[in-house]
Amino acid sequence: MPFLGQDWRSPGQSWIKTDNGWKRSNDETNNNVTPLNSFCDEEDFNKENLLKSVGCDMMTKKRKKDLLNNNTKIQYFHQETWISVHKGSTKERHGYCTLGEAFNRLDFSSAILDTRRFHYVVRLLELIAKSQLTSLSGIAQKNYMNILEKVVQKVLEDQQDIRLIKELLNSLYTTLCALVNGVGKCVLVGNINTWVYRMEVIMHWQQQLNNIHIIRPLNTGLTLTDLPICLQLNIMERLADGRDIVSLGQVSPNLQVLSEDRLLWKRLCRYHFTERQIRKRLILSEKGHLDWKKMYFKLSRCYPRKEQYGDTLQFCRHCHILFWKDTNHPCTSNDPEGSYTAVSPLDFISLFKF
């Protein structure tokens, strides 16, 4: 039986077994036995050629791998909309799902292009930057930076959610500074120089966001200040972040007066915080009334605010599958919708804390 192909057990050529021993298939003098000295020399020559060919293949693969790794635009995750979450091994299934695997396989790259999911993904990136960055694998950490780059480019093009992305970059940069400075204790995957370069990229993004100039539309149509006062106040009540209300009040004197409305800040405090939390942080104004605006910012520093998103990930308690809300997954339950639970970004992190 001939040896075919480049195998580590043979020189990589075709050999035929004869009565006198193994010989090459293309050898015309099959009746003569090859001398031992010439066989040894030929074997050394074949081994040298084999090592050269294997080394050439290894170098070619290494160059392709380096080219692939150096291309930051390539993303190493599957375009999937659901993933099975398991926290242990059974007879039917081996292994468990990690945070990095879920981050790789779920389609977060397309989710940031959806306005309903954009804030959800940004909040998840912020939570990972603050505490879970070191738990990601090398591929997941690179995917994190790729998705973050897409987020920054989207903000630079749309000129929206600038403050939100600035806070995300500040949190990530602070975390990386703490990890990179303690090189001996750093558990980030990859070369330290790679992460220093990524920190420089983050600083460049921060500079781009600081230098951004919002372009006003050329058409002079109906603006916010042209609406009736009741509609302007109604729009302010839809804002869930007090900092947005303060920023909106800086546009014009009329909006400044509306942004100081006590009822507006009272509703905002009661939306985000409980009555017990509010009673612990009461602040009186000079006139003896509750200063709801100051109370809101004080409560924001002490307690987490209520988070709201247009679309979130869902978790099926029956199948233990994590999926996006408007997609289907292979559920075997008789009442699938009754098993669905909305997963906040904090709950997403908690799912993978074993």
Image (cartoon, grey):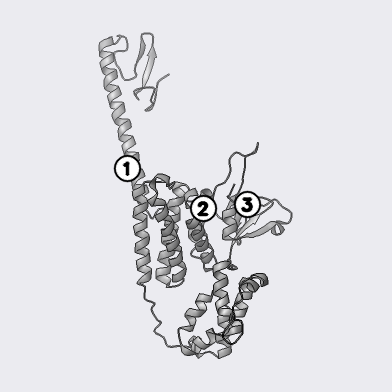
Q: Residue at x 65, y 50 (%)?
A: 320
Type of residue at label 3?
Answer: Ile
Q: Is residue 332 visible?
A: yes
Q: Earlier in the sequence, mark 2 or mark 1?
A: 1
Label 3: element kind: strand
Q: Position of residue 234 (x, y in %)?
A: 59, 83
Q: Residue at x 65, y 73 (%)?
A: 279
Left or right side of 133 for 16 = left
Q: Residue at x 58, y 43 (%)?
A: 96
Judge whether 148 appears above or below 94 on screen: below
Q: Is residue 75 visible?
A: no
Type of residue at label 1?
Answer: Arg
Asked if marks 3 and 2 touch (Cβ < 8 Å), the reply is no
Residue at the disc numbered 2:
103
Residue at the disc numbered 3:
321
Judge whether 3 appears above or below 324 on screen: above
Q: Earlier in the sequence, mark 3 or mark 2?
A: 2
Q: What number is the disc on residue 293?
A: none
Between the residue at mark 3 and the residue at mark 2, the CA separation in whole angstroms equals 14 Å
